[in-house]
Amino acid sequence: MGDKQRARELAESANVPIVPGSARFTFNALDGLEKAGEAVGFPLLVKASAGGGGIGMRRVDDPAKLLETVAATQSMAQKAFGDGTVFLERFVPKARHVEVQVFGFGDGTAVHLFERDCSLQRRYQKVIEESPAPGLPASVREAMTKAAVSLCAHTAYRGAGTVEFIVDAESFAFFFLEMNTRIQVEHPVTEMVTGVDLVEMQIRHASGDLKGMKQDAIASRGHAIECRIYAENPQKMFMPSPGTLARFVLPTEMANVRIDGGYREGDVVTPFYDPMLAKLIVRGVNRDEARNRAVEALRAVLIEGPKTNRDFLIACLENDGFAKGDVYTSFIDERHVTLIAA
């Protein structure tokens, strides 16, 4: 399931809807590429089979740009993953990124721990995640979680994982995107609303101490939001901002505020790794309370040295569209000027 193209094939065999796409193209083997592009339709995405976290994904709007984009993506994927294989996938213009947290027991049984909406992204990297997904009809949530569990059962999946879906923001039709066969950066969102420690589950399952779990024993309560605090400059197209953390003060953790971080004051943020400094996760009885609590907690963040996206995160949370739950993957791109000004 960690191979994007193979995962698509498995999803299709399990009767899980998939985004229209092409066969794979191995490194420097591009025979039939133009015909495949026509069949998928434009705009489309070129995706590295071994990629993850938004790495190895490029959009193509113009058929004349397909060949050079595929060649560049293959070259990058070969260097980054040791595998230059790519495939083409239909691009959904107004899409939401909704994923289902699952846990499989390796015997054909699995449970879900509800969904997360990860639609707020820049350069295909997630910025804000939340659960439950705002405005998602109950029938769609039920169908999506059922599909995710069915896929885990079909593959006898073992351990924690995330089944990711693209959801048409207007029709709510959903399509399998990929599966992350690991714990996710945003797993604390799920832990905040379910009260389940996913890492503990992994350890207990690996040690043979977790034999199974009933779906009806898992419930989602309240609303949780996670904000990724990055050392980057939103005013310069989110370029990483390395440097020494001359001051690094985060809010005090409490029942409804959680901090996951890997830096302390005085540490040096280098340009060689992902620029994420910390994750701020909050919970409220409803979405408005969680959103307001996230803003309050972010205002308590004090960082001197590298530029950060703290104020940009606050601008996103206070944006009228976000407040109404009108979230989709091009949300930041379309509002970039407004959000920067705010």
Image (cartoon, rainbow, N blue to C red):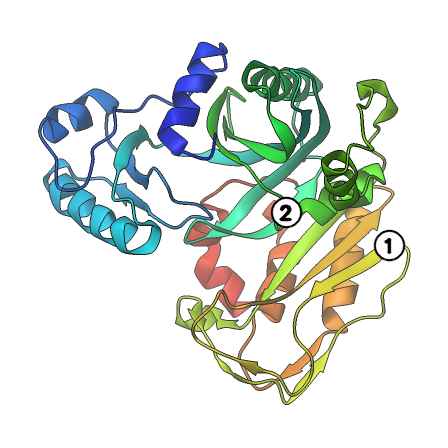
Q: Name the image quarter holding the C terminus.
A: bottom right
Neighbour tally class for label 1: few under 14, some 14-19, many 20 plus, Cα within 10 Å: some
Residue most extreme to the front: 207
Foreground: 329 or 216?
216
Q: Name the one closer to the observer, 152 or 43.
A: 152
What is the number of the mark on residue 25?
Answer: none
Determine the secondary structure under disc 2.
strand
Res 92 visible: no
Determine whether 38 is above or below 182 in the image. above
Disc 1 secondary structure class:
loop
Residue 107: give x, y in percent of width and height.
66, 17
Identify the residue shown where x is 32% and y is 30%: 89
Splitting the image into 4 quarters, where does residue 292 fall?
Answer: bottom right
Residue bearing the label numbered 1: 256
Do callouts 2 and 1 mark residues in contact (Cβ within 8 Å)? no
* Residue 132 percent location from the top left of the image: 72, 35
Instruction: Characterize the local packing of mark 2: few (<14), some (14-19) or many (20 or more) Cα atoms within 10 angstroms.
Output: many
Write the residue at 49% across / 9% down.
15
What residue is at 87 percent from the left and 24 percent from the top?
Answer: 217
- Distance (Cα) linking label 2 and label 1: 16 Å
Q: From what the image shows, is residue 168 above or below residue 280? A: above
Q: Can you tell which quarter of the image residue 90 is in? A: top left
Please state the horizontal and vertical placement of residue 254, each as a whole percent of the image: 89, 61
Query: In this rendering, does residue 171 appear at all?
Result: yes
Q: Which of 128 and 183 is in front in this view?
A: 183
Picture coordinates of residue 253, whole percent (x, y): 85, 65
The residue at which mark 2 appears reads as: 129
Q: Residue at the spot x=61%, y=16% of the render?
A: 153
Q: Which amino acid does label 2 sit on?
A: Glu
